[in-house]
Each structure stands twice: as structure tokens, then as C-alpha cells.
Amino acid sequence: MKLLLQSSRRFFRRHPGQLVLSLIGIAAGVAVVTGVALIHGVLVDSLDSASDALTPDQRLRIESRHGRLDEAVYADLATSRGAPQLIPVLSARVRVNGQPLELIGIDPFSLTSADTIGVAAAGPLLQSAQQVLVTETTLGRLGLSPDEPLRVQINGQWHELEIGATLGARPGLDERLIMDIAAVQHLLKRSGELSWIDAPVDAEKWLRARLSDEFTIRSSRQRQQSAARLTEGMRANLAAMSLLSLAVGLFVVFSVLSFLAVQRRASFGMLRALGVTPVQISALLMIETAILTGLGALLGLTLGTVLADQLMALIRQPVLELYGLLPPARVRPTLVLYASLWALTMALGQAAVIPVWREARQIAPGVQIRALPAEGRAPWVSLTGLGMLLGGVLIVVWSTRLGGAFAGLFLALAGAAVFAPDLALMVLRALAGGARHRLAGRALAMLLSARRRLAPALAALSLALALAAGIGMMVLGFRGAVDDWIDRLLRADHYVTLASGQINDQLAGRVAAMDGVEQISSARRVKLGEGRDLIAYDLPSAAWQGFEWLDGDPEAARDAFMKGHAVIVSEPFERRTGLGLGDAVSLPAPDGTLALPIAAIYRDYGSDRGTVAIHAPLYRRLWHDRHRDSLGLYLGGGAPDAATLVDRLRDIDPRLTLTSRETIRARTLAVFDRTFRISWALAVLVGLIAVIALVSALLAVSLERRREYATLRAIGLTPAAVAGTVISQTIGLAIAAAIVAVPLALAIHSGLSLVVQPRAFGWSLPLSWPLWPLAIILALAAAAGLAAGIYPAWRIGRRDPAGELRGS
């Protein structure tokens, strides 16, 4: 075995490029999985990271079911006999230097534990109402020093604050500003309001005896479960992408190690002649696989941590906009996660190269240059692939949960991957027969007997290209659906909001009385829990044309809604709750639970947790809330232009803001584009991994065919012509893989649009067929084939044909 290890060491010293290629291929797949795995934990933990940093012990959180928590509740509890340590908190989203941060208002005197920031915070926060606490890490990311003023944007207005003190290493408080709660109430113009109250875990019984059903009491675990449910669809999509990248990475492992075995076939033949047994050859390959996979996995874990931070930069804003969660700018790795991923990679790496070990055991004693005879595919492989394909389709059709949909899609794709190489070789045969240039046709025909080497790379590249095109088609189709939805939904000419606070009856009346305004609509949104919203609508007849009804009689639904006898709900609400047409929805009003039947279901892409719409007069009467979040202006003939309307609104209240329908549409599509940037990024990464697999396979083929290339040189082909032959092969292979990827892309697009999207996010998508991603993958495949063929062409062109022809 010592002789074998020395042989292996000498080989890698002579071929450092192959060592680098193998490490890059393995590391790339591990990096994507690591990056997504780190993001998973952050999305779940982000809801409680600040609370955990302020109070390290497990805490309960008291919240109002209606969103607004009166601080009188805190005062009553805190002054009751036997009151536990209670911490009032007011939280809001702000921006500093264009970066989203969370402003947290606390009562410094309520933080009495030695493990909290209470002692340190009391001094600076009480010295001035404009002082904040911020971590050193956050300051560094903002590019500020402790002496500089902090310009904070709150509800569109700018405020200048002072940095009272900097906190050391407290990851949970990164991206957050800590202030005295009274100062935050003043800045937000939310006097007397709280976001929540923190309480010790052992005080639950005491609290429930004193609080009505109007309030919720949730533990840290329950809040994390809530965050997990909120981000379930996004996390599931990321997990699916990362697992697919790992699968493509395993193709890379096989291709790279298969290439290394081909390079050393002559060496293995000599070792066999010296008495080395097939078992020892296999043991050597196992050791090499363990070393390469282990080193590649370590490199992948490191790169994955860096990648996770970059992916987090792509996902932070969408998570904030869609779910109201503010993940940290950087991930926090754990040793358990790293160890698990490393062990998984080691096991999968060994499993992926079993065919390489079997092939190495077949090398006979003596020098071996020619390739082993081409193998057909065993019948059991075809049957297995067909079984996986059909089984995956059945699972997708029969399952009802998101996990079942992903499992079925992966199983079906695995089955398709079994047949992808043969389909690609059929395409390659057709390309060879139809080639106008005889040399190009001969070059492609040379590849038809190299199925063993090309199969993994063709499968990996076909799946990667299909994934990129399928995701592209789904995203473009989804974007078109959202564009149509928002264009139909926005019926008013302009929309009015208040920069800080809500619009009351007086402001609404004065806006409605402006010249040129024929009608107004209004909307008031409050939280129901579990991420769901209750929307109180005042809608003129023109606004009802904005709904796209999926179930129910529109006229009957409108009549029941306007009379306050029923509610209308969004499609995600129906899917999440299982409540359908005619079922009663229980709404927790301050004076008791209100049960109303569902009159109709409408399409909505604004919330993946679901919304319930109620008539505004009924809401105001039962919820004792006469505020509006926004007004819609329906203008008549001869109405003033937008600039004049802005001036008139400023005369009514300088905080009133006018937004056009086109601006809202553009902002909605911008949020959509930001949400799917990470999907594009992961698709590109998977494609790059597949290109590495293609390069490895082509290098293996070039070594096996070196006598044929030498023969071409001997009969008069120039090095340039031979290089052109090789590049023709690489481009032909890539295009063949892209052609096979087209039906796979259509299947992926259909599965994502018709199955995954409804189960992950609760909404259905009208199936559309944007075809330009298919054209793009053909062009990208040709470019990838060209890039993959440059090195093999250069290497083959430099070889001496006489030396190759003398080999036995």
C-alpha cells in the first residue's frame, strides 16, 4: 500500500491542475448547500434574535391580536400584586444609509438582570432623548464612527440621532438601534403604544389569569415556529435548489475521479503486473476519494459561509418586505451544521464513485492505453429510471403537502436523468449526420462510443440547463401574472397615505371634498395572527372591478359584503385554513369573536399567508377603530394634474403623500424582482457546477481517444484542425444537452407553477409559456461548450502523435 500511496502522490505532483479541478468541483456543490443551510436557520431565528440579546433567558411575549398594544396594559400588569419582571418594547423598521434597521424602544429601568444591557443602557439613554445604543459591528457596516451623527429615515422623514454608546459583540442586536421607549414613541408619533411586552416563562399562569382573549401569550419556541411557517415557502424553494446543486456536485465528483482513473490506467496496469491486486487498487481509490472529498468539503464549507453572506444580502430586503422579519446581515455558523455537512459529503462522495472502483478492478496486468469496451446500459437501470419517473409523477399528483411535491419532482428528475444521456447521444448522432462540414460530423461521431464517460456530465448539464430555464420560465410567468393582477387591482387614479400615523375621519373627509375627486376608497389592514391580515375596505363600484374571482357569485358576494353579512377571502387564506365558500371565519373583535361566512374567494399575490376582507363600516363599529391606512382617489373629468393634487394635499396636511397607480405597480414589480434574485443566482451556480462536470468528462474522453487524435494528426491534420475537432465535440455535446434540457425545462416550469407555488405560497399561477429562457440556454450551452473545449483542445494539439501511436 505504501508503494501505491507514493504512486498517487507522484501523480498529483505531476498533475496539479487535476487536483485543483477535483477540489473545485467538490467544493462548489458543498458551498451552495452550506450557504442555503446557514440561511435556513437565520430566517427562523430572526424573529427572536433581538429579544434573546436583550434578555438571554427564555421569555414570553404578550401581543395584542389587533396589532396595537396600549401601554396602559403594561402599567396595569406592572403595578399588580406579584408582578414579574416585565419589559415594554416598541419596534419599527427604519433606514440608515439606505440599509434597513430595526429601531427598538425599551424602558432601561425594566432591564434589571445582570445579564442584560440594562445597567449600561440606563445612563446614555436617559441623558438625551436623541441618543441610541448600537453595536460596533453595525457601525462598521454603516461606515460610521461613534462620534458621527446618525441620520435615520422614519416613515419617509429624516431624523438626526446621537450615538450614546456602542455595544460589544452582541450578534442578536446587530442591525438594530436601541432607544428609550418614550423617545421612540415620539419619533414614530405612536404615543401610548407598544409592540409587545416581554415576561418570564414562569409567569404564564399569572398572566393568563389577568389578560383577556384579546391578547396572545407566546413562548420563544412558538414565535420561532411562527417564523418558520411564515418563511416555509421561501425556505423550501432554497432547500430544493441546494439539494439539486449537491446532486449536480456528485456528478462532478464522479466525473473528476473517473477522469483521474483514466489518466492512470497505464499506471494501474503496470502496478497490476507488479502484483498489486484489484482490491488494493480499489482501496487506493477509496483513500484518494476520502482525501479529495474531505478537503473539497472543508473548502466548500468555507466558501459556503462566504456565499451565505452574499445570499443573505440578496434575501434580506425581500424577507423584510414580505414577512416583516429583519434577518441579520451575516450568518452565524455552528459546529454541528459543519460536521453534519462534512460527513454527508464524505458518504455521498464514496457512493458516487463506486462505478469508478468497479472499472479500476477490471484493469488487466500490463500497460493499458485503449479505452475499455463501450458498455450499454443494463436493463435494470432503465427499469429503475422508468420507475422513478413514474413514481415521482404519482407522488406529485397524489400528495397534498409541499414536501411531497418536492420529493416527487426530485424523484421524477432523477428518473429523467437516467435517460438524459441516451437522448443526448441520439441528438448528437443526428447532429453528426446533418453536419455540413465532414470533419465536424466525424468529430461528433467519435463521441458516440464514449457513453460511459459522457453520461454523468450529460445528465448534470441537462439537469442544470433545464433547472435554469425552468426557473426562468416560472419566474417570468409569475411576473406576468403579478403584473396583470396589480394592473387589474389598482382601479383608482392616485393613492394617498400619511407619512407617519393613520388617516382619521376628518382627513378622509377633507381629501374626499377636494375639487376633481368624484369618489374615494379606503383600506385599513390589521394583523390576525400567523401572518394573516384583516383588511377593512370602503369600495366604490369601480373598485370592485379590480377583483379576480376564483369562487363564488361576484354580485351576491358584493351584496352580502356591503351589508356586513359576509366576508371575502384571498386564495392563500382558503388554502392555508381549508375554509371554503360558505364556511364561517372567526374574527377576534375587541368585544368578542365575530363569525361571518365566506361569500367569495379572490386572487391575491400580496400575502402568502392569506387575507380576510370585511366591510369598513362593520369593522369600525366592532373594532372601535376609525383610522385608514390609505385612500384611493377616483377623479372625474377636468380633474387637476398630479402636481396640483400634491399641493392641495399639503395644504390639508403636510404629511399626506400622493402616489400614482403606475408608481405602485413599478414598486410591486421591483419587490418581485428582488425576491427572485436569489433563485437566479442559485440557478447560475448550479450551471457553473455542471460546466465543471462537462470539462472533467471531456478531459477523460480526450485521454481515452488520444490514439484517434494522433491518427488524425498522422494523416495530415494540423494542430489547429485537431483543436477545432475537439471544440466541435464540446460545443456539440453542450448543445445536445441543451436540446434534451428543453422538455425537462417545460416539465420543471409546469411543476413549479402548478404544484410547488400553490403549496408553498398558497396562490395559483395561470400557466404561461415565456420561451426566451429556452433560447438563452441554447446560447449559453454553446458558450459553455466552447469554454470547456479550450483546455482539452490546447492539450491535445501539443501532443506528439508519434509517441501516442507507439503506445501499446
Image (cartoon, helix red, strand yellow):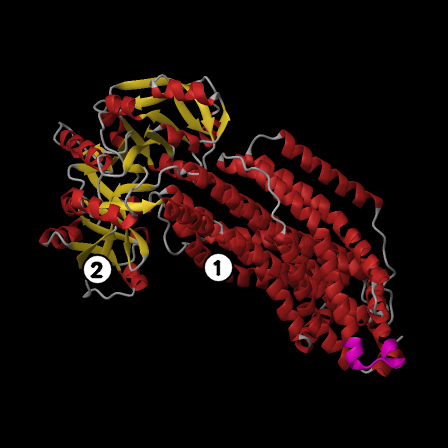
Extreme left residue here? 127
Q: Horizontal and vertical percent for residue 664? A: 38, 46
Between label 1 and label 2, give the one nearer the viewer. Answer: 2
Decide if residue 48 is on the left or right side of residue 688: left
Q: What residue is at 62 percent from the left and 53 percent from the top? A: 772
Compare marks 1 and 2 and give the one earlier in the sequence: 2
676, above or below 72, in the image: below
Q: Horizontal and vertical percent for residue 444? A: 82, 64
Residue 716 falls within the magenta-colored stretch: yes
**Kind of residue sitting beneath label 1:** Leu
Q: Horizontal and vertical percent for residue 499? A: 24, 45
Residue 371 falls within the magenta-colored stretch: no
Q: Horizontal and vertical percent for residue 357? A: 76, 58
Q: In the structure shown, which secondary structural element does the residue marked by tag 2 occupy?
A: strand
Q: Are marks 1 and 2 in contact (CB under 8 Å)?
A: no
Using the rendered image of the protein, determine whether residue 86 is visible from the camera's viewpoint.
Answer: no
Residue at which label 1 appears: 307
**Which range is magenta?**
711-723
Pointer 1 local density, CA inside 10 Å: few below 14, some 14–19, many at least 20: many
**Kind of residue sitting beneath label 2:** Leu
Residue at which label 2 appears: 150
For this rendering, which residue is in front, 231 or 368?
Answer: 231
Decide if residue 273 is on the left or right side of residue 494: right
Decide if residue 395 is on the left or right side of residue 357: left
Corner quadrant of residue 541: top left
